[in-house]
Image: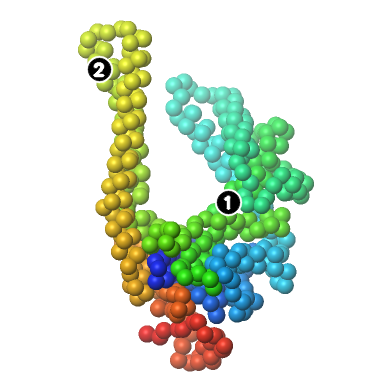
């Protein structure tokens, strides 16, 4: 995991990223590079989070290869930079690794196996709940009957959900047909291996195959990457930001979607603060309340108000010895409506309070921060997340040196803080090579 921040206003955009990377289950290194220039010649930067590789290639390598290919080419808008980068990783034919069908195959089979195991785990969870809350003793034939029923209904429900869900980006029914032809036998083999202790009918197996392929084309995996592209197009006075979720390639097509867009200008907000990956501390800072506490409070109050009408009405009818069921139901319906209105009113009041007393003031201050203050704010928010991880019992998945950059229209991409894996004093040739012919980028040494 990681923590990354983008702070935008009319002066420019500040980007900050930590250096933590998790290897395996519990091994964490604080040496990862997640913030880069997308162009050496123009004011555009990029951050990456999530999976550190694309098609088995480190994102750092992909970005630097693209940067060399881009050279001094520019685009009128930042959106065109973002689309050009997306096109590069989807269609470029100069690097066979970006087109690797072997890597696609490995990734797809892993996705299928994880999906099938997740479904099996969910089946046994539901079975355990049914047994746990059953009032009668359940023998083995009943368990097998329940298991068959749960398996069939769960797979049917998942297939129904996916059938109604849109394909990701440019996938379609033809991709579904292609993948089914390629993987149906392998999927049946994986299903037989994972469900060796559960008898599945041919109809259920067929539906489970469909579920796996639909998931691949309609859901993102936990192994996805995020990229954030920010800065200025050649014709743009104010900065903007585009972020994407990228999940490898499927059927030779890039599996991705646009995630967030932020633009600064006359017709938009004067500032934007956008967290990526681990974002709870930033939301707490901006909104004034921890998102998990807010969700818990909302759920508790919702359940409380939902159950109160019946409890009150039962108490009143018992106290007055009333037995009119029609009257009871009429009053209960009215009380439920009042309860729902109270909850909606509570949510709206809290939302407005947060907006007026926390969110709007923070955004108003951010809108007037100068370049150095933008950098300080972005770095502070990453450090806040890192510190929270340090003093909690969870793994320190955010930490290490924080790389910080500011991008402005006039000065271009400016490093404020930048770690190197080498001693800068011993490697002047690196900077000479990097800066050769470059006009927009500067490196600030501290």
Q: Quadrant of residue 377?
A: bottom left
Quadrant assignment for the C terminus: bottom left
Percent x, y for residue 148? 61, 29
- Is 96 on the left or on the right of 346, as rendered? right
- Tag shown at residue 315: 2
Q: CA distance from mark 1 to mark 2?
A: 49 Å
Examine the rendered structure and indicate whether residue 204 appears above or below residue 94: above
Q: Quadrant of residue 341?
A: top left
Q: Secondary structure at mark 2?
A: helix
**What's the residue at 37%, 74% (across, down)?**
371
Percent x, y for residue 114? 60, 49
- Is 401 on the left or on the right of 430, as rendered? left
Residue that sits furthest to the right in the current view: 181
- Is 423 on the left or on the right of 109, as rendered? left
**What's the residue at 38%, 62% (across, down)?**
270
Percent x, y for residue 402? 40, 72
Percent x, y for residue 182? 76, 49
Examine the rendered structure and indicate whether residue 403 appears above or below residue 356: below
Location of mark 1 (residue)? 220
């Amino acid at each position: 995991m990681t923590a990354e921040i983008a702070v935008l206003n009319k002066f420019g955009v500040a980007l900050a990223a930590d250096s933590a990377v998790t290897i395996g289950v519990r091994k964490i290194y604080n040496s990862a590079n997640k913030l880069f220039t997308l162009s050496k010649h123009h004011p555009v930067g990029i951050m990456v989070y999530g999976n550190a590789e694309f098609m088995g290639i480190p994102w750092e390598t992909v970005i630097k290869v693209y940067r060399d290919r881009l050279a001094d080419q520019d685009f009128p808008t930042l959106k065109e930079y973002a689309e050009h980068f997306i096109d590069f990783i989807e269609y470029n034919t100069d690097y066979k690794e970006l087109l690797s069908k072997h890597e696609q195959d490995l990734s797809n089979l892993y996705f299928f196996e994880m999906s099938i195991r997740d479904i099996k785990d969910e089946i046994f969870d539901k079975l355990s709940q049914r047994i746990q809350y059953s009032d009668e003793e359940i023998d083995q034939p009943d368990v097998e009957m329940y298991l068959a029923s749960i398996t069939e209904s769960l797979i049917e429900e998942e297939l129904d959900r996916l059938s109604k869900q849109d394909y990701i980006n440019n996938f379609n029914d033809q991709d579904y047909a292609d993948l089914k032809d390629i993987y149906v036998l392998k999927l049946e083999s994986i299903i037989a291996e994972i469900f060796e202790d559960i008898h599945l009918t041919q109809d259920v197996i067929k539906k489970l195959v469909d579920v796996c392929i639909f998931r691949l084309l309609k859901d993102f995996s936990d192994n996805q990457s995020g990229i954030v592209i920010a800065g200025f197009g050649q014709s743009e006075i104010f900065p903007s930001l585009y972020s994407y979720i990228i999940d490898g390639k499927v059927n030779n097509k890039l599996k991705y979607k646009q995630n967030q867009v932020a633009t600064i200008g006359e017709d938009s907000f004067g500032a934007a603060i956008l967290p990526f990956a681990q974002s709870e501390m930033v939301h707490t800072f901006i909104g004034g309340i921890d998102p998990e506490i807010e969700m818990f409070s909302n759920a508790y109050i919702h359940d409380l108000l939902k159950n109160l009408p019946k409890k009150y009405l039962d108490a009143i009818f018992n106290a007055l010895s009333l037995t009119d069921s029609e009257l009871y139901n009429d009053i209960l319906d009215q009380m439920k409506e009042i309860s729902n209105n109270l909850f909606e009113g509570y949510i709206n009041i809290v939302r407005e309070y947060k907006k007026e007393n926390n969110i709007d003031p923070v955004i108003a201050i951010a809108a007037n921060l100068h370049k150095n203050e933008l950098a300080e704010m972005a770095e502070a928010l990453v450090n806040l997340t890192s510190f929270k991880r340090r003093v909690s019992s969870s793994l320190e998945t955010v930490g290490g040196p924080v790389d910080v950059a500011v991008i402005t229209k006039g000065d271009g991409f400016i490093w404020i803080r930048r770690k190197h894996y080498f001693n800068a004093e011993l490697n002047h040739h690196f900077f000479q090579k990097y800066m050769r012919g470059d006009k927009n980028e500067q490196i600030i040494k501290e």
